[in-house]
Image (tube, rainbow, N blue to C red):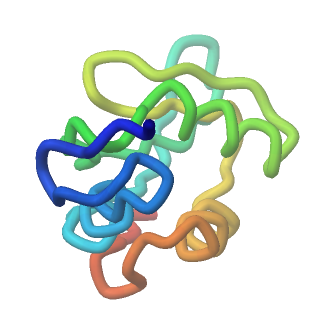
Amino acid sequence: MSDICPKCGLPKELCVCEAIARESQTITVSVVKKKFSKVYTMIEGITDKNIDLHELTKQLKNKLACGGTSKDGRVELQGNHIQSVRKVLIGMGFSPGSITLKP
């Protein structure tokens, strides 16, 4: 027997909670200069508990070939990936209208 999602009532294999959560987020992508003049791309606003922030960070690091971390509810990627991050997030199912870029 398969488990049933308590939110949407569908079997776990067909659960749409994460897809709905991805479309309803308001995401801000910005570039920040930190210690030793290193540039980081910050992704903030992913607050839904249906989205695994650590898994999202892992996927972004893989696709952009960079280092990074997730902490305090945000994703930090090493380097300036502001345009690439937007394309990758849209490819992952996030709504294009919900992604705001702050260069």
Q: Position of residue 62 (x, y in %)?
A: 81, 40
Q: Position of residue 74 (x, y in %)?
A: 35, 32
Depth order, front residue of 66/57 = 57
Q: Is residue 81 above or below residue 47?
A: below
Quarter location, residue 91: bottom right
78 with respect to 55 (left or right): right
Q: Residue furthest left?
A: 7
Q: Residue furthest front?
A: 1
At horizontal 22% and vertical 36% (from top left) the residue drawn is 49
38 with respect to 12 (left or right): right
Q: Residue furthest right?
A: 65
Q: Is residue 10 above or below residue 96?
A: above
Q: Position of residue 55 (x, y in %)?
A: 56, 31
Depth order, front residue of 42/70 = 70
At horizontal 80% and vertical 49% (from top left) the residue drawn is 64
Q: How many marks?
A: 0
93 with respect to 59 (left or right): left
Q: Is residue 40 above or below residue 23?
A: above
In which quadrant will I find the N terminus? top left
Quarter location, residue 19: bottom left
Depth order, front residue of 100/63 = 63
Q: Position of residue 9 (x, y in %)?
A: 18, 57
Depth order, front residue of 13/67 = 13
At horizontal 27% and vertical 27% (from top left) the residue drawn is 73
Quarter location, residue 37: top right
In which quadrant will I find the C terminus? bottom left
